Amino acid sequence: MQLGTAFAFFLVASDAAMAASQPLRIVSFNIRYAATSLDKNEKPWADRRTGLINQLKEITTNATDAGAVSVLGLQEVLDAQLNDIKDGLGSEWVHYGFGRDDGEKKGEYNPIIYRTDALKLVYSEQKWLSPTPDKVSFGWDAGSRRVSVIGVFEDIKTGKRFIHANTHLDNVSSQARSEGIKVVLSRIQAVQEEYGPLGVTLTGDFNSEPDGDAYSTLQDTGYLTELWNSGATRLGTNELTYTGFSTTGKTRIDFVWFGPTSEKRYSAQQFEFLNNYIDGVFISDHRAVVADLTLL
């Protein structure tokens, strides 16, 4: 992973310029739910857990050592996996978000994980991606219930605030993806009305390639900029985020977005798609997307 030393060098080189700014490390990672029926080359969570948690610890420790604050937007997290991850990261790490199937602990979470000694959660909400977002519900022939998780965070040291949103769009219905991202965006903008104007970051597995249905729906609004298109430096050689349990293939469907584009509240330094094949084990069928931004 090249992000640690590169980010530290950037921060030292521009320390004076960023005195009134806040460095952030934003992570999007579909960790793969703890399946009981395994795909080819897939290992059970008990075998994937250590490598995945160690990677998250390295991501966040490098950022903290460099003076940045980390926010993790994860997808496909079951309750037991969430507990394992927080235990592995340490007692200062907490989450916001609930199981999508009952609004409590049932089904997958899209948790936002953060450190309570670095960030204060000012406001939070979870909404379902459907015509009835306040209720546990399906939308637009989706194969699964899908949610949007949003938090307004305040940096404890600087007092700077920002909005972070995390989602996982449907893998079955194109309409559910396109309509779902509209719900996510409408909720971000509603939070902006109440707490803004603030910078926004959005993480998620869109199940939509660049220029695909949901991606284009969001991009065409012009409200947020996807990291790949931001001019930030891409570190490493990986170009894809969803690989399956294979070292070859498949596509780029996991993203970090930031904005609002017209307000220039962020500068983007660099990003990397981390390896998901570690010590002979695929820790997930996705790669983590790690982005280094500065909240201006």
Image (spheres, helix red, strand yellow):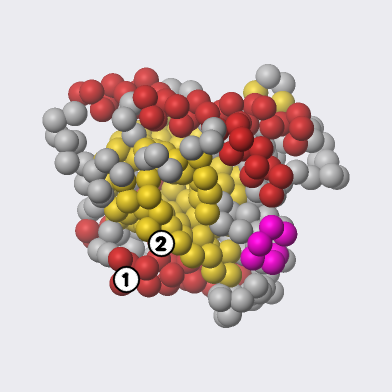
* Residue 249, above or below 187: above
Q: Taken as a whole, is the magenta stretch helix, strand or loop?
A: loop
Q: Amino acid at mark 1?
A: Glu
Q: Position of residue 154 (x, y in %)?
A: 32, 51
Which residue is at 46% across, 44% downward? 114
Q: Position of residue 124 (x, y in %)?
A: 45, 62
Q: Secondary structure at mark 2?
A: strand
> Mark 1 sits on what residue?
194
* Residue 205, above or below 12: below
Q: Residues within 10 Å of mark 2 (few under 14, many from 20)?
A: few
> On the rendered structure, is 210 left or right of 259?
right
- The magenta stretch is 101-106
Q: Secondary structure at mark 1?
A: helix
> Mark 2 sits on what residue?
123
Residue 205 is labelled as: none
Q: CA distance from mark 1 to mark 2?
A: 10 Å
Which residue is at 31% across, 30% downward? 67
The answer, for residue 264, to whether it is visible in the render is yes
Name the outermost residue toward the bottom.
131
